[in-house]
Image (spheres, coloured by chain):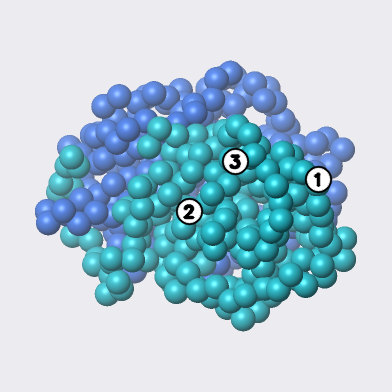
Amino acid sequence: MTRPTRPGPWQVAEVVGTRPESATSRTLELRPADWPGHRAGQHVDLRLTAEDGYEARRAYSIASAPEDPYLELTVERLDDGEVSPYLAGEVRVGDAIELRGPIGGHFTWSADEGGPLLLVAGGSGVVPLRAMLRHRSATGSAVPARLLLSARTLADVYYRDELPGLAELGVTLTRAAPAGWTGATGRVDTAMLEAFAPAPADAPRTFVCGPTAFVETVAGALVDLGHDPLRISTERFGPSGS
Amino acid sequence: MSIVSRGFRGRRDGGDASRLPPGQYLESGFPVLSAGPTPRVDTSTWTFSLTGLLDEPRSWPWDELMALGPEPVACDIHCVTQWSKLGTHWSGVPVDKVLAGVRTDARFVMVHAVGGYTTNLPLEDLTGGKAWLAHEFEGEPLHPEHGGPIRLLVPHLYLWKSAKWVSGFELLARDERGFWEAGGYHDRGGPWREQRYQGD
């Protein structure tokens, strides 16, 4: 298994498709000019340039598996965002977006690394984990996989139709649940993790992704439950709030 | 030469753009990016060690390190994930004090941290008033998720070089790649020359 040692140069990617993921997000399907391939969990840097030369850059996790035909990114529209309203709203099929990648070495998984896999996602943190699960499915891997997903409401869950077929799925809703909801409610806590995760003796390979406070809570709880910190990789989005 | 993104306007920050290195944006929060869970470091058992290519290894428990004398630091910090935070305030022991009197032919350092994180950089980027072992941020003890109780602070390089939960320097004759560097990040990491990835 070779690991890329550096991301490639900036290149142009054509937008070949878009589809809504939730009320406030959508997935872009991209065809880069010269993509070297990637490992599930990696991300790309995007570069947007206004007519006067002003540049903005952001990182986005790759939502697609290495086996998928197009590079997919899922973008949540943040009301006060500079870049996300453009990517989640304005961009259309035929547009060109500059990107650079793949980037990232620690938050990656390929099927030959084995498991069992424990994936814990807060909100948009599910994006790189979806790439891992699609890769697992594409390779026919027998590695057991569990995904615990926290979202505000059911309408905020990405890949809703796809996820149940990709992993043993647990969903907890933190703000509102629909009538007749039989899943969990409330924030992920130690008790929920203990009930959902494999036993520490099974030595799962764990990936936790989401807002900083979510990741701190979950990673800390898993360590408290006896899981090996060296087998837990984390990716935190967003400011710490301090 | 970048292409123009159809319909993109962007938002020009009111902040001082001349203090932002290329490709960075102004961040008012303080994002946390770490590869794994936040380690719990106990200052009563923690030590800082100098090892590798030097006359004799040295190590300091917490109180002895603090006795070297921390000083205030005001600086801008730049993360390779594009955010920059201007005008931050820290307190830390200058690395120059830790290296005072050390005789070495080393030109590079592998920085070690609790939990196994490593990062490499040239020795000259740690000396001459450019680096500190920082234990306070904005007047308070440094929070664990930001590297508390103590982290390396090298503000003129991208923040991944400022190893959180720092535990020692290994002095090297030849450069070796640390955690992120082995995954494609730059051996030096200077924001003004935009040294993000290997080969930049």
Q: Please tell me in which quadrant of the rendered image residue B13 appears.
A: bottom left
Q: Nearer the viewer, mark 2 or mark 1?
A: 1
Q: Which residue sits at x=81%, y=60%?
A: B60
Kindly identify the amino acid type of the residue bearing the numbered disc 2: Leu
- Tell me: residue A114, above or below residue A106: above
Q: CA distance from mark 2 to mark 3?
A: 15 Å
Tell me, yes or no, whether dots 2 and 3 are on the same chain.
Answer: yes
**Circles 2 and 1 on the same chain:** yes
Residue at x-position 57% and y-position 60%:
B131
Establish if A56 lies above or below A73.
below
Amino acid tagged 3: Phe
In the rendered image of the structure, the colour used to display chain B is: cyan
Q: Which residue is mark 2?
A: B157
**Residue B194, position in %: x, y?**
37, 47
User: Which chain is blue in the rendering?
Assistant: A
Answer yes or no: do the residues labelled 2 and 1 have beta carbons within 8 Å? no
The residue marked by circle 3 belongs to what chain?
Answer: B
Dot 1 crowding, Cα within 10 Å, few <14, some 14–19, many 20+: few
Residue that numbered label 1 is attached to? B56
Circle 3 — which element?
Answer: strand
Residue found 78% across the figure and 72% down from its top: B67
Residue A181 appears anywhere in the view: no
Determine the CA span between mark 2 and mark 1: 28 Å
Foreground: A66 or A7?
A7
